[in-house]
Image (cartoon, grey):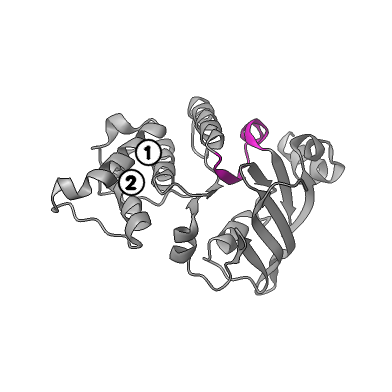
Amino acid sequence: MSDKNIVLHVADVHKRFGGLHALADVDLQVEEGTVHAIIGPNGAGKSTLLNVCVGRIKPDRGQVVFDGQALNNHQPHQINQLGVSRVFQTPEIFADLSLLENVMIPAFAKRDGAFRFNASSPVAKQKDIREKAEAALEDVGLQNRRNVEAGSLSRGDKRRLELAMCLVQNPRLLLLDEPTAGMSRHDTNSTIDLLKRIKSRGMTKVIIEHDMHVVFSLADKISVLAQGRIIADGTPEDVRANPKVKEAYLGEAQT
């Protein structure tokens, strides 16, 4: 590990669901300002790990530390207020609201500590929130559709909208669960370019992704999960050459 600041440390985390060991002795350190990818076969425990990091699932053992602060006893909204945002595997948006309204809601939450939106309140009182929301939509290429109802979007655009809902909060740590799922290759490449621009701002990202083109285009470091355990951890070059990874995942993906 380098001398960079460790912004996220998952320390000896264990989680069991009945007889299934979803996570076993997971230790993960994410350096500030980097893109850290987590890969592995389906059912490896990747989404469970993100759920532990954001407080949706409590570990049976171990702890999650963000910026020096243990998160085990924090609720998801408290973790969000500390500067951790997540893009889910299935987009979580407000289908009946416009794109702009969708992005304004988390902007309010970040500013005021509560999810609320009152469309009837004077526009002047919402100006700062509106400007932030429009900037976030522009970041993801959706500003021209800001008044469109979110439920009408394609799956790929819904994922971009959810990303804007995270970006408007200006998080220190962004967790992305399959950010390019359901996208065409063109949209995938656009998302890669977008995430590279975000990286230039110093935002730390943890990405779960099956598309190896995305992983190797973005990742500074990769951790490989298999059956709830990390079997490899290192640079993309190290992981690509690791025989255990080829057997457990990469080789399987290339057949």
Picture mark count: 2
Image coordinates of residue 21 in percent, x first then y, are 71, 67
Q: Which amino acid is tagged 2? A: Val
Q: Which amino acid is tagged 1? A: Ala
> Of 234 and 94, which appears nearest the observer?
234
| Location of mark 2 (residue) | 103
**What is the crowding at mark 1: few (fewer than 14 residues within 10 Å), some, or many (at least 20)?**
many
The residue at the point 35 percent across, 36 percent down is 135
Q: Is residue 238 left or right of residue 141?
A: right
Question: In what element is the residue under mark 1?
Answer: helix
> Of 47 and 9, which appears nearest the observer?
9
- Whether pointer 2 and pointer 1 mark residues with C-beta atoms closer than 8 Å, the reply is yes
Q: Is residue 115 left or right of residue 191?
A: left
Corner quadrant of residue 73: bottom right
Quarter of the rendering occupied by the C terminus: top right
> Of 45 and 123, which appears nearest the observer?
123
| Location of mark 1 (residue) | 136
Q: Is residue 156 left or right of residue 210?
A: left
Q: Is residue 39 above or below residue 62?
A: above
Going from N to C along the chain, the mark reached first, 2 or 1, is: 2
